[in-house]
Image (cartoon, helix red, strand yellow):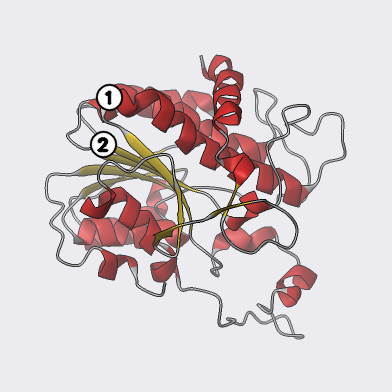
Amino acid sequence: MRATAAEVLDGLDLSGRRMIVTGGSSGLGIETVRALAGAGAQVTIATRNPEDAKPLLDEFPDTRAVTLDLADLDSVRGFCDAWSGPVDAVIANAGVMMLPTRQVTAQGWEMQLATNYLGHFALAQGLHSALRDAENPRVVVVSSGAQLRAGFDFDDPQFERHPYNPFLAYAQSKTADVLLAVGISRRWAKDGITANACAPGWIHTNLARHLDKATLQSLGAMDPDGNLITPDYYKTPAQGAATTVLLAASPLLDGVTGRYFEDNQESATVDGGPDVMAGVATWALDPAAADRLWGYALPVIR
């Protein structure tokens, strides 16, 4: 449970493997890149601000940073069009959480759903042939325990008719992330492509920048004076990235697809709800929902 990403990959030689990490210049992404590159992989950091990746580029000369804005489908298309050759792993790590007000993209998609799900869906679609051309290609989708709190609302996914709720919007997007892995596993297994989702756990990163003081204090992550503190159940970023790199590179996951992991283990399937603290909700692994979401998103990216 407390292993770091580097410890998970200890002894593995990833030389010659080409991997993409979205959001690889901050938070969990940094530790994901550091572990994969440290094991010899050639990592492309896909990020809105490539200059933020300079410390990693200095540390790992074979690593590169390329502009990618997941909320901008033109940016995603440009990234995919510029890619050349096979890709061994696409790690959908980037995300936004609990935006306080409803924001929408040019396609009219709520920003959390657009960034966390739709942009990664478009990225995977655009790189399908590059994945297919790799020897043991994998897609890893970083989700969250928030998927336990809400299924995907096909009746009002963009909060057009109901009042916007920052947490429900985030939870829905993280359920969509798991459904993305399920959808890929159902369609692309014939191409040798596997896809799995994971939860990194609670970690102090910039992802939580929109959480207010009361919320952080209720989590035991902030003291009365507004200083961040680290509860025992929190992980370090290096520990949080462990499950991600396990799914991306470990031979233990060869052929495993369409599943959800936390703490470096496959999670039990449970009924989601407000008091459930671990596992993956039944609605997040529902193949019918995965197919429906795939059909809902595909016309948008074309």
On screen, residue 87 versus residue 172, left or right, reads: left
Pinpoint residue 12: horizontal percent, then vertical percent: 16, 60
Query: Which is more N-terminal, label 1 or label 2?
Result: 2
Residue plotted at (75% across, 58% down): 274
Pinpoint residue 122: horizontal percent, then vertical percent: 47, 27
Task: Kindly tell me whether residue 4 is visible in this rendering.
Answer: yes
> Residue beneath label 1, please?
191
Pinpoint residue 234: horizontal percent, then vertical percent: 54, 75
- The residue closer to the viewer here, 58 or 97, is 97
Q: Which of marks 2 and 1 is in front?
A: 1
What amino acid type should be assigned to the residue bearing mark 1? Asp
On screen, residue 11 versus residue 274, left or right, reads: left
Q: How far apart are labels 2 and 1 at the CA level?
A: 9 Å
Residue plotted at (67% across, 47% down): 170
Q: Do the residues labelled 2 and 1 touch (CB within 8 Å)?
A: yes
- The residue closer to the viewer here, 142 or 150, is 150
Residue plotted at (59% across, 57% down): 145
Q: Is disc 2 placed on a helix, strand or loop?
A: loop
Residue plotted at (28% across, 65% down): 8
